[in-house]
Image (cartoon, coloured by chain):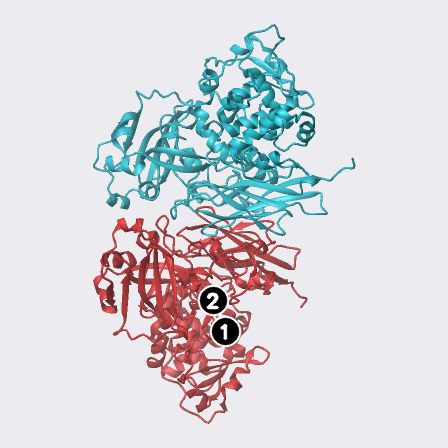
Chain colours: A red, B cyan
Amino acid sequence: MENIFPPNSWTWSLGIVFMTGIPTRKVQCSELTTKTNAMLLLRHCQGVTRVGLLKTQRLLNSVATPSVTGCVGSLCARWGSSHGGQESGSYKRSHVPNWRHALAGLLAGTGAVLAYGLHSQAERAATTMVQPIDPPTSMPIFTQDDVTKHRSIEEGVWVTYKGSVYDITEFVSMHPGGDKILLAAGGALEPFWALYAVHSQEHVLEILSEYKVGELSAEDRRKQQTVKSSDPYSTDPVRHPALHVNSLKPFNAEPPAEILSDNYITPSAIFFKRNHLPVPQVDPKAYQLHVEGLPGAEPLVLSLEELKTRFPKHTVTATLQCAGNRRSEMNKVKPVKGLNWGIAAISNATWSGAKLKDVLLAAGYRPELAQQACHVQFEGLDRDATGTTYGASIPLHKAVSDEGDVLLAYEMNGEDLPADHGYPVRVVVPGTVGARNVKWLGKIIVSEEESSSHWQQNDYKGFSPATDWDTVDFKSAPAIQELPIQSAITQPAEGATLDRRAEEVTVKGYAWSGGGREVVRVDVSLDGGQTWKVAQLQGGEKPQPGRAWAWKLWELTAPLPPATQELEIVCKAVDNSYNMQPDTVAPIWNLRGVLSNAWHRVKVTIREDEEE
Amino acid sequence: MENIFPPNSWTWSLGIVFMTGIPTRKVQCSELTTKTNAMLLLRHCQGVTRVGLLKTQRLLNSVATPSVTGCVGSLCARWGSSHGGQESGSYKRSHVPNWRHALAGLLAGTGAVLAYGLHSQAERAATTMVQPIDPPTSMPIFTQDDVTKHRSIEEGVWVTYKGSVYDITEFVSMHPGGDKILLAAGGALEPFWALYAVHSQEHVLEILSEYKVGELSAEDRRKQQTVKSSDPYSTDPVRHPALHVNSLKPFNAEPPAEILSDNYITPSAIFFKRNHLPVPQVDPKAYQLHVEGLPGAEPLVLSLEELKTRFPKHTVTATLQCAGNRRSEMNKVKPVKGLNWGIAAISNATWSGAKLKDVLLAAGYRPELAQQACHVQFEGLDRDATGTTYGASIPLHKAVSDEGDVLLAYEMNGEDLPADHGYPVRVVVPGTVGARNVKWLGKIIVSEEESSSHWQQNDYKGFSPATDWDTVDFKSAPAIQELPIQSAITQPAEGATLDRRAEEVTVKGYAWSGGGREVVRVDVSLDGGQTWKVAQLQGGEKPQPGRAWAWKLWELTAPLPPATQELEIVCKAVDNSYNMQPDTVAPIWNLRGVLSNAWHRVKVTIREDEEE
């Protein structure tokens, strides 16, 4: 396809198709006779509805012919736009702000939630709906290594999509979703587009096609297939490339912080992964869940089908957090043992399954038993080389409480549990540390004792900063169950540069507390904690008392303080028991680096106006 | 009575009678023929069993005659003591440490709890068991004003007891209970002895008699009777003089911090008082409790007798804390509105009464109702001048939970509720801020709404430090219910001087968390938070999960750090949800000065050895 317009003109194309939502509308400009011409001219039309880049104004002046303005006028009339704007022409004023808002919404917060709803269809849609525009050509052949070298504006930003290679360097500054496009730099676009369904539309591929620079080598195309081996981790699933990997075997990874708060419901693909052992391969037809330890009752054995059909299905939106979330901050005080998690070993999902209470009742649990048994143990199907399974337990009163909402979940975000999240069945213990939400659940044991597993007895406990590996007595501290109040800043990132001309800064993040305690306030400081502003809490229905299992995302937009070129942005949250986060890390430092919930601090610089 | 021995000899008399427990044993020294002589000589015997004061050693050398050592030997044999000691004589070595431990125990921690068990009988016992030793004499007559002027070692320490005046200046340094004796300086002993039943023994009065200096004027004896007036507070009860009064009308007072941690169960007399209005006079025979708001059910009216007989009696040990406890620390950051509480607006008691749940069921509550009603409101019988009653509410799920343990209490520490604590019936909401534990309970209303009272809607809420009286929107914050993790140091006191020769320091305090969360650790720092040690937790049975309603007292003894003359002692507690206290006050400052739970800090100085 000829590229008769400069690449940056199609930013607006992207936008206008979002607004109409129906590509066929594009041919309604009466001057146009062929579909191809219509689309090309439409790009001119769309030029006048820009998303706010300075370049557009210049382009607008050069391409706004009478026929184009007529076209735009008719489109505007159909859209019935009513917002005002700052441009001089009336047709421009009428809908420019719409664009801006719609795009910002779609690509950032709520839009991404909406987008997620479509994400599972996204890849299929992209395959079936849109045929590759260009047939195989004699364009240059590149290897994956060639592509991988292009991961920055300086080196060029290359991506692949369905075997083609694209140099999108010039597009980066125009990407409506901002710098997030760089997450895909040097790699494939598919997994990112799967997260953001706005990309699964015909015009997006049109736009992309303009940047094509070559083809990926046949060998690299084939490399995407996983090769089996004797490695116990060889059957682990393929993961999303955006994840920041802390450990490959077992697989432990968190999403980039900057995309974490885009979604109230974290897409399963980027939900943080915390595996202690290889992911077990479970045949759903052969799956059995064993429930035992109930005095006077035979052990109960349930198939997956029985679990799904014998018990009512409940859905709970719950945030899970690893006990080691934000461990990296403790590591900076003094080295600790454990995966060096950033701030994103926390995610939020909807979980559906049977209530643990219902299954225990079916297995013979009676309330009188609460006098004898105090714990419910869980065993996973994941095993180490010696055959030892992962295990944990929770207090019985949580397991059988009507308000405890403990699930034996077989769905995550409306689909079967992904392999990394416990397929086919996991425990979801809302308000409780991730480690007790046992995945690949094989056995439930009602018991007088806590689980004897390493992870219950000698791990996932909190200690004084005075306790070291020579003096630690793991028996002296309780196993972590409910987690304390937590919050962190996801935007801007540590070290980011803000532009003084923007005049204000938007700070975003998450906040959550354990035990069903609702986050009621997040305070944000731009001066290291000297003064504070109250952030806006977002997302989620008002929870029932004591059952606030899901996080709150929050946002604050504040003027950039004058006369400073560095900001120390700080956040701290408060839950409805008015628990507050500690100010600093050192006094809560502990040898395992768990429970890291001091105020989160991010330093950024302000770039002052430069003389032009 | 002649005083043939120096006053400081009878310190040991006090001790020995504690140990034997049976005063008649004192005549078993065979050399003695009359009771009087026996007691006098016994004082010599007791001289060798001192409580550890340096003076004793000197005295011992001067009075240890053969007959005395024989006497002590026989006493030792009877006691069968087995502890070693540091003195040179074998009879001394055998029981000196016993003394020290017994006295320390009796006068400080568990001893005081034991003592409290007797305290209600104490005054009567002192009246009936022990007759005044001296009949009216021609000793000088003093007014209360004369006595009040003697409140320090410098001015002399005078006290009154049953109309007599005593100058106990010389005894202060020998008081086994330490400086606490100064709490009574310039006033009456009776209320203090009521707290510490060890004083209600014959020999204590004997000892006291030696310090008699005169009689209290007849007018001042009569002044103890309360005079009725038109003042709505004129019928308020007489309070314990040890209380630190924050406000007289309404009465708000806290115990001295140094005696707070003497008792796991706080004696009712010194349990902090937090009244919003005058104490109502309630006739128990006419008392009615109204329960209403249950759809489809007639209001239920219960007499006190019915409340006591129709429902099982439950007993719960629960700590209550005022939302404003430790407000004085916030006041130092920036002035706040409210009573300037120190660290002792918190106390622990046993409460007995009917379960609120049982009464609600009797009134027609059914679990289905939880869909419609969310709150249980309480109205007190205390009223302001306009007739408005005190009111508050709690969430329904707390009120009707089996594990919520909400009581309609008619007993405190095993006796009828005292007037200041809600006689005849109050609500006790374990784990919840004091303000919801409505006293002098008149009405219970099950409702869709929270209480509309000032105290629920426009008070007892937490805000950001950024919120001031111009910007506050009380609707924007939830009413405080569960309180966050809290701890404070009760000993040593701010500004205390430690003696370098003691080589170590003992730090004591309390720790508690709301919502039934158990305190699992208290960290103590002697260097302002740079390094930490773990304190020993004391007291209380292991609570059921989620039902840790009572505080934990704690203690740490640590070597005095060398090369410093000032210590900043800090404590911070952790609950079993691993909630931690914030480091500093300013970031949690709020305009009402509530929820003040930053690390507690106490500065003390070390007095170095002086050249002798």
- In the depicted view, which residue is nearer to us: A208 or B320? B320
Q: Percent x, y for residue A267?
A: 39, 67
> Pointer 1: residues within 10 angstroms few (<14), some, or many (20+)?
some
Which residue is label 1 attached to? A183
The mark nearer the N terminus, 2 or 1, is: 1
- Taking the image as shown, residue A364 lies to the left or right of residue B21, namely left
Q: Which quarter of the figure has residue A25?
A: bottom left
Q: Is residue A152 above or below residue B519?
A: below
Pointer 2: residues within 10 angstroms few (<14), some, or many (20+)? Answer: some
Amino acid type assigned to the residue bearing label 1 in the image:
Leu
Seen in the picture, residue A112 relative to B106 is either above or below; the reply is: below
Query: Which residue type does callout 2 highlight?
Result: Ile
Chain containing mark 2: A
Q: Label 2: state its secondary structure.
A: helix
Q: Is residue B403 left or right of residue B243?
A: left
Q: Which mark is residue A259?
A: 2
Do the residues bearing badges 2 and 1 touch, measured as CB atoms within 8 Å? yes
Q: In this view, which residue lies farthest toward the right?
A: B611
Q: Quadrant of residue A423?
A: bottom left
Quadrant of the image containing the C terminus of chain B: top right
In the rendered view of the protein, which quadrant contains the N terminus of chain B?
top right
